[in-house]
Image (cartoon, grey):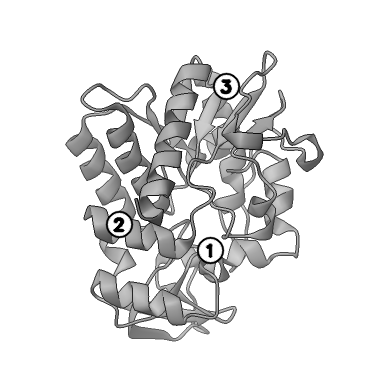
Amino acid sequence: MDYLDHLEAEAIYILREVAGQFEKPALLFSGGKDSITLVHLAKKAFRPGKFPFPLVHIDTGHNFPETIEFRDWLVDQIGEKLIIGHVQDSIDAGKVVEQKGKNASRNALQTVTLLDTIAENGFDACIGGARRDEEKARAKERIFSVRDDFGQWDPKRQRPELWNIFNGKIQKGENVRVFPISNWTELDVWNYIKREKIALPSIYFSHQRDVVFRNGQWMAADPVLQIDNEDIVENKSVRFRTVGDMTCTAAVDSIAVELDDIIAEIKASTVSERGARLDDKVSEAAMEERKKQGYF
């Protein structure tokens, strides 16, 4: 067994633990490479049967069209249930207030929509594709990460996970976030995608795109960015290392059109993939504060 076999076996074991320990789990699906990898692992864990959980996507309304198109294609291919929580519904209900201004984003608003979706469906565990190498707050999380009855995460209430023994016992109202690929790196994910021939949205590969240079990053030139006369739209060869809301996900200059090219590019990079996420740069503890409030 090579190291990818070990990572795969661990992730499958964790997915089966979720199915065995929880009554109503769900798999949080963003349409990004990590959640797509989770779907592939779930197929290995549970086929030929159906998944013991639905896929859940929190749609900001500002997602990349390519991501939404791929999401719908993948769900049709695997024949599993998809539940969509719409941030626009939370805005319309007055539960959240949409930001104003040139750098406004709906990214942070997802937390309320996610917690409402969890409560409405009675989910007691939510599987996510977060990895420890992505960001320092995520490095603090256990694989089974307990959230209180307000959906909040307390880094001081972490449970020990010695010898890969996972404790899923929770009180009424609590839920657990589960991270089966927590021990993977970005490079591990790409090597696994290459080995398993996993399909991905086209935006992960180099393509020509209209972009604007904002806050030191190349952003997709889309009306949701509130482009004005000060913005200069350029057409460049770019790709996206991470996929999120269009208002906070930056592109990188790239000519990588094949998986080998992307892997070589990542090996040479001195910036983490979250370096292209503007939402992580609000403050030093931006991610940790969002996670405490119930973020992914």
Q: Residue at x 67, y 13 (%)?
A: 172
* Amino acid type at image mark 3: Ala
State which mark lies toward you, 3 or 2.
2
Q: Is residue 290 visible?
A: yes
Q: Which of the two discs, 3 and 1, labels the residue nearer the N terminus? A: 3
Is 33 left, or right, of 231 in this rendering? left
Kindly give the residue lying farthest to the right in the view shown: 156
Q: Quadrant of residue 160?
A: top right
* Amino acid type at image mark 1: Cys
State which mark lies toward you, 1 or 2.
2
Q: CA distance from mark 3 to mark 2?
A: 33 Å
Q: Residue at x 27, y 73 (%)?
A: 260
Q: Position of residue 82 (x, y in %)?
A: 34, 31
Q: Provide the residue designation for mark 3.
A: 119
Quadrant in which the C terminus appears: top right
Q: CA distance from mark 3 to mark 1?
A: 27 Å
Q: Provide the residue designation for mark 1.
A: 248
In the image, is residue 72 above or below residue 121?
A: below
In the image, is residue 148 above or below residue 255?
A: above
**SS under mark 3:** helix
Q: Residue at x 33, y 66 (%)?
A: 204
Q: Is residue 57 visible?
A: no
Q: Nearer the viewer, residue 175 or 244?
A: 175
At label 2, counting other C-alpha atoms closer than 10 Å, the crowd grade (few under 14, some 14-19, many 20 or more) is some
Q: Provide the residue designation for mark 2.
A: 193
Q: CA distance from mark 1 to mark 2?
A: 25 Å
* Amino acid type at image mark 2: Ile
Q: Quadrant of residue 211?
A: bottom left
Q: Nearer the viewer, residue 105 or 293?
A: 293
Q: Position of residue 64 (x, y in %)?
A: 36, 58
Q: Which of the two discs, 3 and 2, labels the residue nearer the N terminus? A: 3
